[in-house]
Amino acid sequence: MRICLTIRGSGSSLGLETNNQHTTNWFAHFMRYATTSARNCNFAVRNNCFAKRVCVFGLSMLFAFFANARIFAQEPTATSRPHILLIMTDDMGWMDLACQGNPVLQTPRLDAFAAESVRFTNAYAAAPVCSPTRAALMTGLAPARLHITQHGADQPSFWPDDRAIQPPKSEHELPLASTTLAERLSDAGYATGFFGKWHLGADKKFWPENQGFDVNIGGCGLGGPPTYFDPYRIPALPPRKAGEYLTDRLVDEAIEFMRREHDSPMFVCLWTYNPHYPFEAPKEYVDPYNGREGAGLKNAIYGGQITATDHAIGRILTELEQLKIDDETLVIFTSDNGGWSGATDNRPLREGKGYLYEGGLRVPLMIRWPGVTQSGKEIATPVVSMDLTSTILDAAGVQLDQSSKPDGESLRPLFRGEQLAREELYFHYPHFAFHKANRPGAAIRRGSFKLIRRFDDDSVELYDLEDDLGESNNLALQKPELCRELNAALTAWLEETGAGIPQSLHTPAAKK
Ligand SMILES: [Ca+2]
């Protein structure tokens, strides 16, 4: 009989070969003890995997000597499964962190995390508004394919009276028939916990506990919290302590889950309500920003929300260290769409939430995957929310069947210095946002070029983001051939995904 035990985080395994079942059972018990002892040892460099391996190997050899069995060592395997901590903020803009270049906002914990991570400089949300990105990340499928393309239920109050087109119907509930990331990881043996904003169905039957999560704290149909202070009036979050701040509470709950479950693989989704409207933050976080409004800060309370969020996320990252699982946890940090221009300064990007310009789509993304990512590295390859789904499944060793056809790719090749297979990213937002100021459209990015098509008049805009990050110089007239090529690719993608397209209201029938 041959058994082997993996030292999580190091990716290494030690094993034993014997014909004696009794010896095998004792070895399993012994190795669990040895591994725990090694993890708890106070090495000079606590996360020194080599030291852990030496310690476990020494103890194992001792056992083998007495048990008269043969010990073997195994090289790191692709089946080592990390814990997964997926943090997604709500409406945090691309420029809303100091490490992203914001000159005012104080985000020391996320800046430190960025320094230990790979930072993606061309990361995109699947959509410029909430729910579609959430659905995309949870399924690995593009919002256009899911027909979940609007922030919650679309409604007449979002439609300008003088509109030339009528937006298509958008689903706003993630169907129970969808196979979610949580369901796939749960099937693979992960404990699954959801903490925060869900926004994928008002009816309880669509909430996280019915979409693959063992635990749901705060996830419901709400797109924003009625208030950030307890009592929150959030259906899936009972009051606890009057005046407590929402993000602190969610992190407390996530930490409690981690303390309980970390002996086996965990999938922890912390999807903060912050820094989405309403503007509310503890005074101690707001005070440093009072009077500092200007470039990089429109609103002192919003600044307080960002720093409060940074502080809370810092606590969960510290907890990984205290549980001694930071070197065996894949941590991903991102946002669900660009910053809302009413709250934050997205410059140098154009516009914000609800637009297909970079301000609406581009988001922070940092990934720390011990043994896989290099600290402090930056990657400029354009990536999108669905890639995170594929990356997580890759890390967990979950194989997708052919029928799943994910719209993302695992980012692991990029960490090895290789390229992704695809050449384009596509976006589809055929709606008017809550602010009604955008034009419904779709977009394609290939290389440094981005083409946006407007559904109201079928016009296109073309930008070279390498030279023109602010999308101020429309090259459509100068590069008609490239426009035709990108527009044709966009048409083919919209057809392939079965995307819902707005209808013209200027037909003879409609004019009557
Ligand atoms: Ca959002």
Image (cartoon, helix red, strand yellow):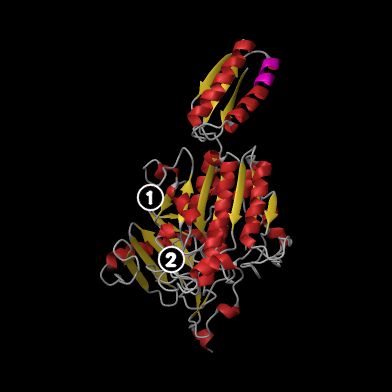
* Numbered label attached to residue 247: none
Specify the amino acid type for callout 1. Answer: Glu
Residue at 55% x, 60% y is 309
Please state if 72 lies on the left or on the right of 18 as rendered.
left
Which element carries disc 2, helix, strand or loop?
loop
List the residue tagged with mark 2: 104
Q: Nearer the viewer, residue 164 or 128?
A: 128
User: Is any part of residue 479 visible from this angle?
Assistant: yes
The C terminus - image quarter: bottom right
Q: Nearer the viewer, residue 205 or 178?
A: 205
The N terminus - image quarter: top right
x, y percent for residue 239: 73, 62
Residue at 61% x, 67% y is 223
The chief SS type of the magenta part is helix
Seen in the picture, residue 37 relative to 405 is either above or below; the reply is above
x, y percent for residue 387: 48, 51
Q: Is residue 24 magenta?
A: yes
List the residue tagged with mark 1: 378
Badge 2 density bin: few <14, some 14–19, many ≥20, Cα 10 Å: some
* Residue placed furthest toward the left: 478
x, y percent for residue 457: 41, 77
- Range covered by the magenta-colored residues: 22-27
How far apart marks 2 and 1 lie (CA) works out to 22 Å
